[in-house]
Image: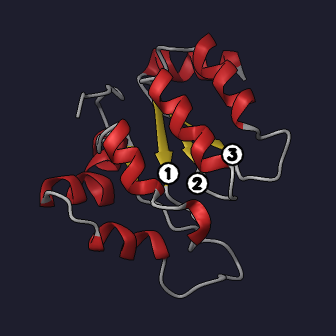
Amino acid sequence: MPGLLRRCGELGAPSLVHVISESTLKAPSRLERLLTTCPETTVIALDAFSGSDQPGAFLEIAERHENLYCDLGAMISVTGWIIQRFLDTVGSSRLIFGTDLYVVSCTWYAPAPLFEVLHLDLEPSWKVQILSGNAHRLFQPGTSARRPRS
């Protein structure tokens, strides 16, 4: 994995790493080792806010590693205001809307993270960043995955 992440960093491409909870192979601590080893690579933690303990761990990791973005896919309701806590601590530039609606068979018709972001008392520009802007910036062809400060 470090070699793959380093190559993504060289190319200016973000690396997507699946970190669904309940998997020791995909544990937050393992991803943190990669973030430390490859600080030049932007990493998007897919399903970072799944499970009841994992969201808090990723919030702490995001505080320590500016190259970490967190995706909202598979976010569950017991995470306890995790989006607001992430925004208060890390800012809006490293949070990415995700739904997991590509999964067959789908477990919901409307993603809860969407409603959470829409109903938070945020500046409209932050909502745009989370719901589309950050992903557009990271995946725009011909640009590198640079991390702005929020």
Q: Is residue 117 above or below residue 49?
A: below
Of residue 40 and residue 95, the one placed in the foreground of this image is 95
Mark 2 lies on a secondary structure that is loop
Where is residue 124 shown, x and y percent of the image? 14, 61
Image marks 3 and 2: residues in contact by CB distance under 8 Å: no
Q: Amino acid at mark 1?
A: Asp
C-alpha gap between disc 1 and disc 2: 8 Å
C-alpha gap between disc 3 and disc 2: 9 Å
C-alpha gap between disc 3 and disc 1: 10 Å
* Camera sees residue 52: yes
Q: Amino acid at mark 2?
A: Phe
Instruction: Please indicate whether residue 21 sits to the left or right of residue 115 in the image.
Output: right
Q: Residue at x 45, y 60 (%)?
A: 81
Q: Which mark is residue 49?
A: 2
Where is residue 20 shown, x and y percent of the image? 71, 52
Q: Is residue 16 above or below residue 119?
A: above
Q: Is residue 119 above or below residue 50?
A: below
Mark 3 lies on a secondary structure that is loop
Q: Which mark is residue 89?
A: none
Q: Amino acid at mark 3?
A: Val
Count of marks overlaid on the render: 3
Other-residue count near label 1 (Cα within 10 Å), few / some / many at <14 / 14–19 / ≥20: many
- Residue under numbered circle 1: 71
Where is residue 60 shown, x and y percent of the image? 54, 33
- Residue under numbered circle 3: 19
Q: Residue at x 28, y 74 (%)?
A: 119
Instruction: Please indicate whether residue 62 sits to the left or right of residue 48 in the image.
Output: left
Name which quarter of the figure residue 16 lies in.
top right
Image marks 3 and 1: residues in contact by CB distance under 8 Å: no
Instruction: Please indicate whether residue 55 sits to the left or right of residue 137 in the image.
Output: right
Q: Reading the chain from its start, which is encountered first: label 1 or label 2? A: 2
Q: Residue at x 66, y 82 (%)?
A: 107
